């Protein structure tokens, strides 16, 4: 028996078992040896919503929820947000190391030169109603890209994986911008290869009749920081979806579409949209105490607060709050910020929230910035999906190369009816 083990006694049989501990976990399959007799299937673990289950080993992102630590490949998010760019961080997340200058130049060139989409994508987009939610448009269109690149289903072909990686990172901003332009009844703006990743996105979103779109450098940098902060977050709901769907080996386009669908929900990436709707509904700082009271009565949730992992503060929220001030220097102060700041001040002093370890998360302030940039609330989750695409892809690629991984297929506890015979219609009550 080694020290790195758990010795358990099955009180049903008196049998003792030594279960090895590795990486702070017990391999669930070790439980299957614990049986009451030879015909017993053996024990399983029960963990609805995976509150305490590690689904994989990963080297991409590290989070310490109690200490508010977030690192991509070991680099603290604070340093990356201050000193890096989104494309450089995307390279880091995908390949594990910061690129040298020639690697970065080639990477930027590759991403820049895959931003166009097939003209049929425009026809597809025109089929959506004018008021179609951009997330529905984005999810559908990403899945549709699967039909343009049938070779993408060769997920064990490294060359194809690299090409689809570049296509997804490059084309999703284009599709996102097209979804916005379609909703606004504006002509699509083709990518401008002279602009940065974020500058080009702003151009595809907001270029009007000017010959050349010139992004405001402060807003361009603020968006780059926001994209860095949203790039990956280990095994969150949407990334776990990417891994789950990817485990049956479809092409990466449909897997990313599935991940984006998971992100869409208000408990996850849809929260930034819900936050701004909540703040707008509150309308004035004087209404905050009553809203907080309604939350404490359990009538609603304080959107943008709380996190499954962060139990003190979300380091991204701290940086986003700082970025908001940079943006408002250019756009003018968003009055919703005052409501948000008052809500945070009250909540952080109220035991209801403190006792439940509810603090502002990444979504609490991001929507206020997006609104100040001129984006409609329906685009906020799209703004989350764009940068998170690199995290989904990196985790998917890691899963493909992980010898421990097979098709994901959880078990269940069956509590339904025991065997019974079919009842003809005239015998039914
Ligand atoms: C993201 O996983 C990730 O990493 C996600 C993400 C990423 O980068 O991928 O960080 C991005 O999704 C951030 C979270 C955005 N979602 C929201 O802001 C929606 C509002 N927050 C929640 O619904 C909630 O806090 C979750 C979903 C974020 C976390 O939920 P948990 O961990 O399942 O916690 P829970 O729902 O079991 O709540 C625990 C307690 C409960 O109270 P009691 O039943 O014990 O009395 O806290 C309460 C909840 O009612 N609670 C809240 C609350 N969140 C939890 N009460 C009021 N307002 C809230 N926001």
Image (spheres, rainbow, N blue to C red):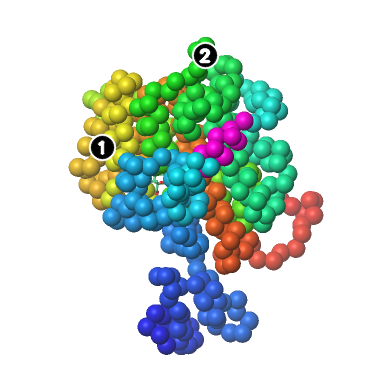
In the image: residue 308, left or right of residue 391: left
In the image: residue 273, left or right of residue 158: left
Residue 245 at x, y percent in the picture: 61, 52
For the residues labelled 2 and 1, the Cα–Cα distance comes to 43 Å
Can residue 310 be spotted in the picture? Answer: no
Mark number, residue 211:
2
| Start-end of magenta stretch | 107-116
Rate crowding at label 2 as few (under 14), some (14 to 19) or many (20 or more) other CA atoms within 10 Å: few
Q: In the picture, residue 145 is in which quadrant? A: top right
In the image: residue 5, left or right of residue 323: right
Task: Tell me if residue 388 comes above or below residue 245 in the rendering.
Answer: above
Residue 327 at x, y percent in the picture: 33, 27
Residue name at image x 70 percent, y 52 percent: 154
Task: Tell me if residue 410 comes above or below residue 36 in the rendering.
Answer: above
Residue 279 at x, y percent in the picture: 34, 28
On whether residue 112 falls in the magenta region, the answer is yes
Q: How many marks?
A: 2
Mark 2 against mark 1, which lies toward the viewer?
2
The quarter of the picture where the N terminus appears is bottom left
Can residue 129 be spotted in the picture? Answer: yes
Task: Tell me if residue 120 comes above or below residue 307 in the rendering.
Answer: above
Question: Which label's residue is closer to the chain start, 2 or 1?
Answer: 2
Residue name at image x 34 percent, y 56 percent: 64
Q: Residue furthest left?
A: 349
Distance from mark 2 CB to nearest ligand 1 atom below 8 Å: no
Residue name at image x 79 percent, y 51 percent: 425
What element does badge 1 sit on? helix
Task: Tell me if residue 123 comes above or below residue 307 in the rendering.
Answer: above
- The residue indicated by pointer 1 is 344
Residue name at image x 64 percent, y 54 percent: 158
What element does badge 2 sit on? loop
Query: Which secondary structure type mostly characterizes the magenta part of the structure?
Result: helix
């Amino acid at each position: 028996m080694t020290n790195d083990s758990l010795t358990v006694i099955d009180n049903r049989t008196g049998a003792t078992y030594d279960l090895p501990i590795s990486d702070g976990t017990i391999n669930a399959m070790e439980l299957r040896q614990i049986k009451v007799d030879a015909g017993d299937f053996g024990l399983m673990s029960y963990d609805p919503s995976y509150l305490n289950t590690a689904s994989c080993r990963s080297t991409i992102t590290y989070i310490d929820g109690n200490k508010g630590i977030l690192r991509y490949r070991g680099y603290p998010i604070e340093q990356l947000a201050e000193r890096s760019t989104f494309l450089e961080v995307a390279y880091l997340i995908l390949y594990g190391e910061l690129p040298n200058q020639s690697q970065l130049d080639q990477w930027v060139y590759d991403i820049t030169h895959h931003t166009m989409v097939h003209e049929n994508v425009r026809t597809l987009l025109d089929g959506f109603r004018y008021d179609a939610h951009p997330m529905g448009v984005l999810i559908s269109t990403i899945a549709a890209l699967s039909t343009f690149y049938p070779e993408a289903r060769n997920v064990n072909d490294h060359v194809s994986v690299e090409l689809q990686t570049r296509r997804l990172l490059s084309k999703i901003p284009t599709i996102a911008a097209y979804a916005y332009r379609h909703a606004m009844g504006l002509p699509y703006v083709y990518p401008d290869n002279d602009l940065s990743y974020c500058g080009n996105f702003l151009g595809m979103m907001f270029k009007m009749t000017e010959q050349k779109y010139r992004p405001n450098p402060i807003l361009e940098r603020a968006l780059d920081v926001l994209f860095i902060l949203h790039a990956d977050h280990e095994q969150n709901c949407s990334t776990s979806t990417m891994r789950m769907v990817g485990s049956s080996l479809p092409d990466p386009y449909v897997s990313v579409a599935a991940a984006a669908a998971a992100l869409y929900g208000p408990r996850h990436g849809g929260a930034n949209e819900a936050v701004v709707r909540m703040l707008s509904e509150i309308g004035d700082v004087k209404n905050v105490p009553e809203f907080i009271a309604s939350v404490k009565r359990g009538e609603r949730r304080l959107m943008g607060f709380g996190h499954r992992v962060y139990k003190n503060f979300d380091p991204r929220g701290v940086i986003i709050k700082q970025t908001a001030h940079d943006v408002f220097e250019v756009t003018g102060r968003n009055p919703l910020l005052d409501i948000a700041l008052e809500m945070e001040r009250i909540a952080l002093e109220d035991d209801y929230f403190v006792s439940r370890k509810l603090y502002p998360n990444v979504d609490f302030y991001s929507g206020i910035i997006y609104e100040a940039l001129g984006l409609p609330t329906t685009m906020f989750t799209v703004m989350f999906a764009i940068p998170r695409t690199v995290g989904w892809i990196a985790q998917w690629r890691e899963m493909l190369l992980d010898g421990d991984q097979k098709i994901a297929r959880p078990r269940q506890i069956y509590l339904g009816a025991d065997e019974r015979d079919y009842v003809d219609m005239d015998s039914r009550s």
